[in-house]
Amino acid sequence: MAEPRKIVVVGAGLAGASAAAAVRERGFGGDILLLGTDPHRPYELPPLSKGVLLGAADEPDWVHGEDFYAENDIRLSSGVTATRLELGARLVLDDAGGEHRYDRLVLATGSRPRQLDVPGGDLPGLYTLRTLDDALKLRSAFTEAQRVVIVGAGWIGTEAAAAARTHGAEVTVVAPEQLPLANVLGDGIAGVFRDLHTEHGVQWRLGEGVAAITGDTVPTGVRLTGGDELPADVVLIAVGVAPRVDLAHAAGLEIADDGGVCVDAGLRTAAPDVYAVGDIASHFHPRYGRRVRVEHWAAARGHGTHVAGNLFGEHEPYLESPYFFTDQYDPDRGGPAIGCEYRGLADPGSDRLVVRGDLSAYDFTAFWLGPDGAVHAAMNVNQWDDGDALQRLVDERITVTAEQLRDGNLADLAG
């Protein structure tokens, strides 16, 4: 593989910025272009629905300092969107009229919030949460709102509900599922999150769909499929995100069943010298023997850092286990709160749930055991001493019994 002279990274979020920095850190002396739609320099997304939305911070966690890109000769083009890829010509075109030739191309275009396909679903004034500007606008709205309706009971929906309640608004969460987060955590642990929010005064309309967003020019409420209408000053649509693969699809790259760009274990697409990382990467994960697409912070950072070596001829597989974290409510402001970390990849429908600790006290570690007795995933809730052991149990898929997980020494079990 010839040494590249120019590397173009499309997407200036955590994955793209991590890739650009790692390339330079490896001693690459050629040109690096980091092209991003967001007008701000690269930042991490988790603080948006946590510290920023709560009002504990006015800025996100920036991926790098303000001068980093200039000091490391990385050309950062913010507020510019790639519009077309010409893979045969090794060319990226953008909406500012730029044409950028590349020797290696990294696609890190991230995700966009999904919309509701219902009457009123396109009304101006509906909120979504994906960018820094979204978070600042939503925070301001929460501080002034009396009634907030959140459509969606996933991570963004539940974290936003905690923030809105912290700001004093009445909050109702609507979702077709019977429990929040059940598709990720299963009913046993999902019930813990439902109870946490109920204790803080959140109203649930679970098992119900949205028939329409009401209002003539701005949203004034949400009509449910059962006929009830929920009045609202603020309506947040938090029904998940869709990977931004339009650019890749139009260029002829293969799209997987999970909606992401197909990449191999080393994050390479089938096109010569083109890689995909972060939310859009449908990655063949050697540990699981199948494609995995993860929309979390750790995958974005890990993919970006890892792909740098493979741009120069290495073919190392990306092996890290999925990881995410959440913080919901603040114990210093009164009432119960949850801080947790999740490692691994469970199937709540087939894996066995094992709990070490007390669910009702929000002080426990949950494990998901596969049919073979191996630890597929672990989530520590308000417990912070066993992170290394949990990581080894998950990474090495160590076989243990439920009794050992409940009562044994986790460090000894992890070896």
Image: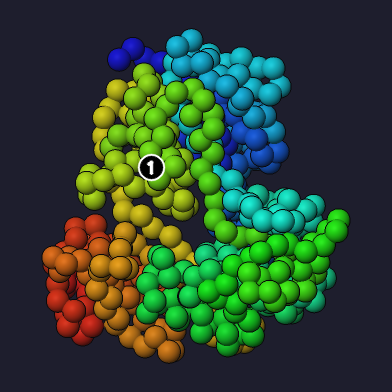
Decide if residue 72 is in sight here. Answer: no
CA neighbours of label 1 inside 10 A, class few (<14), some (14 to 19), many (20+) = few
Query: What's the amino acid at mark 1?
Result: Asp
Decide if residue 293 is in sight here. Answer: yes
Left or right of residue 188: residue 173: right
- In the depicted structure, whether residue 85 falls above or below residue 336: above
Pinpoint residue 302: horizontal percent, then vertical percent: 40, 45
Pinpoint residue 358: horizontal percent, then vertical percent: 36, 88
| Residue that extends furthest to the right in the rendered view of this protein | 217
Label 1: which secondary element? loop
Q: Quadrant of the N terminus?
A: top left
| Residue that extends furthest to the top in the rendered view of this protein | 89
Left or right of residue 83: residue 291: left
- How many discs appear? 1
Pinpoint residue 236: horizontal percent, then vertical percent: 68, 62
Left or right of residue 231: residue 307: left
Residue matched to label 1: 257
- In the depicted structure, whether residue 59 falls above or below residue 82: below
